Amino acid sequence: MYIDLKRDSASQAALTAGPFSVAFGVLAVAAPLCIAALIVRYAVNVPIYDEFDWAPLILHLHAGTISLGELWMQHNDHRMFFPKLVALGLAMLGGWSQFRECAASLAIAVAGQLILLRLLRATFPARTALVLLAGDSLLLFSPSQSENWLWGFQTAWLLINTCVLAVIVLLFRSKSSAWSFPVAAALAYVASFSSLTGLNIWPVGLIALSSSFRMRRGLLACWIAFGVIAVALYFHNYQYLGQGPSGAFSRDTPPSTVPLYFLAYLGGPFAAWAGVGWSAFFGGLGVIGLLIAAFSAWWPNSPRGFREKMIPWVALGVFPVLCAALTTLGRAGLGAEQALAARYITPATLLWIALFSAGTTLAAALPRPHLQPALRLTIVACAAFYVCAFANGLGHMRESYNETLEDYRIATHPATATDQQLQRFYPIPSVVRSELQELQDVGEGPAGRPDLPEGCPNLCR
């Protein structure tokens, strides 16, 4: 089945040498710069939806009464301890600013990009790693993740992604340094207490460690113990909200919705714009691709070094699949269309990044004529759908800007805003009005900046 992994190294080097390497490098750098420009253009300094729950944190920060219990308190199903710390730390730099939070999200994503480069360099020649990084960067910094780029509250999604990449880099190499394991465990705790989906990092770490089981049985035992402790802490005094009508096993949830939701979640990076059907189709391809990668990694007759190259990418691909399964359990009752939400695209991108690298490794180990037609068709299809996803994401960013700019105008005048207007922020208008007034009194939030002109499209930062 397999042949020499180095068989085509000369032709591969020729393909990516010279101007090609420069072009791919420029593309990898341009991707985050593009998102930075979009954040500058479209981010608005106003808390919306879930972030309004953090207004009391900001008020207590000013009063000096903030407590550990507030940081540990659940937000729906999530314990967002570390995202809250990030928000409070940024607020201490010059006030509560959603724009600054968006910038922090981008910085965290760039850190993830650099960690991904490290992982690529550990498993591929330099030129191949650069080519893959360019394609991966287009996914990591796609405008289709519009919610996570323009809402300060969404920092958790980027933080977890970066932690997952870092944990895999630290754990999978058999020659990792003495501090790699404790740092990986610490980052796994950061992910675990950033969102419920962050708990999925523990099985990912197990897969990463499995590359050399005999040498790492002690580390595997320690990792399992740390994971059990994390789960126990997470669910200590946990208020289980129940599935209700939104759960996968609700009486009102059609059975067909559950697999559609799961697959559409995973296909979102390419086809969320095209609807549930196409997104589920891509998600199905992604699951099949991951199964092939996992089967290949543990194939008994694989060449030396092949399994070690494949395992980190299999581990990375497992994370979004677990996230999709967990989200499906809690949200499928809302309808399969809900799986197309822009925030879910962020973890789902890791599946495709993993498949690109696993596919490249597998292609080098199989007779090329058997793969060329399929690879070319896959690349063309992904490129076409990605372009549409990119354009659709830009459109959503413009729409979000117009909506949040109107929210900003309302938030600057809480006393005169109507209940209907205040419900754009939170379901209970009286709570919104009261907290906006309190924020204004301490010079925080949109209402705390009355000196800015009405509308202020270029100043509401």
Image (cartoon, rainbow, N blue to C red):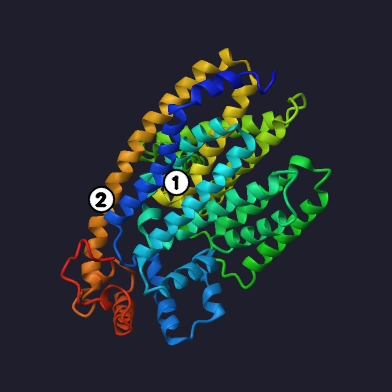
Q: Is residue 153 above or below residue 219?
A: below
From the viewer's side, name the closer residue of 348 and 34.
34
Quarter of the image for the N terminus: give it: top right
Q: Is residue 36 left or right of residue 183?
A: left
Give the residue at x 40% y 63%. 101
Q: Residues within 10 Å of mark 2 (few under 14, many from 20)?
A: some
Q: 144 left or right of 317?
A: left
Q: Position of residue 128 (x, y in %)?
A: 55, 30
User: Mark number for residue 398?
Assistant: 2
Q: Secondary structure at mark 1?
A: helix
Q: Nearer the viewer, residue 225 or 428?
A: 225
* Foreground of the two, 388 or 88: 88
Question: Mark 1 = which residue?
Answer: 345
Q: Is residue 26 above or below residue 34?
A: above
The image's mark for residue 222 is none
Picture quadrant where residue 294 is located: top right
Q: Nearer the viewer, residue 366 or 336?
A: 366
Residue at 40 percent of width and 65 percent of height:
50
Q: Disc 2 residue type?
A: Arg
- The kind of residue tagged 1 is Ile
Residue 240's place in the image compared with 173, above or below, is below
In the image, residue 436 lies at what x, y percent? 30, 78
Q: Name the image quarter holding residue 126.
A: top right
Crowd rating for badge 1 (residues with CA inside 10 Å; few <14, some 14–19, many 20+): many
CA gap, disc 2 and disc 1 = 18 Å
